[in-house]
Image (cartoon, rainbow, N blue to C red):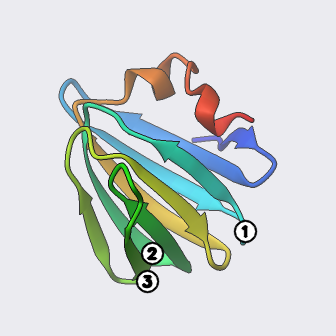
Amino acid sequence: MPRERVSETLERRLITGDRMMLAHVYLAKGCIVPKHSHMNEQLTYILEGALRFWLGEDQKEEVVVRAGEVLHIPANLPHKAEALEDTLDVDIFDPPREDWLNKTDAYLRK
């Protein structure tokens, strides 16, 4: 599967079924995923590198997730992330992210 270049610092590969989606997400060091939320439940499993997450509307909860670790993000929880180093993560969504499939994820494409 070819990588989709979403921005200068973020690429991904998507695999989707009827009720779930798996994404390989490649983030260059310094990549910022702006604060957003979605109705999809999310698991983020870091294969290489590390991501810092800010969770909640006020972003007061901060979590660093490193290689071999998993973060669960409940549906509708606002979150933001920063790649602390070049990172490869596997994101699993239920249901699939329609905005990723139809390329309306403008918050990532800035």
Quadrant of residue 87 in the image? Answer: bottom right
Q: Which residue is label 3 attached to? A: 67
The amino acid pointed to by label 1 is: Gly
The amino acid pointed to by label 3 is: Ala
Quadrant in the picture for the N terminus: top right
Dot 2 or dot 3, earlier in sequence = 2
Q: Is residue 75 above or below residue 32?
A: above
Dot 2 or dot 1, earlier in sequence = 1
Task: Find the distance from the CA under tag 2 to the CA under tag 1.
Answer: 17 Å
Quadrant of residue 38 in the image? Answer: top left
Q: Which residue is label 1 attached to? A: 30
Secondary structure under tag 1 reads loop
Apparent side of residue 14 relative to residue 71 in the rendered image (left or right): right
Furthest residue in direction right, as rendered:
8
- Do residues under tags 2 and 3 come within 8 Å of each other at their CB atoms? yes
Apparent side of residue 90 relative to residue 6 in the rendered image (left or right): left
Tell me where residue 106 appears, x and y as whole percent: 63, 26
Tell me where residue 82 appears, x and y as whole percent: 59, 66
Q: Residue at x 49, y 55 (%)?
A: 80
Q: Nearer the viewer, residue 26 or 81?
A: 81
Disc 3: CA contacts within 10 A as few (<14), some (14-19) or many (>=20):
some
Disc 1: CA contacts within 10 A as few (<14), some (14-19) or many (>=20):
some
Q: Which residue is label 2 attached to? A: 47
Tell me where residue 30 appears, x and y as whole percent: 73, 68
Which numbered circle lies on residue 74? none
Nearer to us: label 2 or label 1: 1
Q: Residue at x 28, y 67 (%)?
A: 71
Q: Nearer the viewer, residue 81 or 87?
A: 81
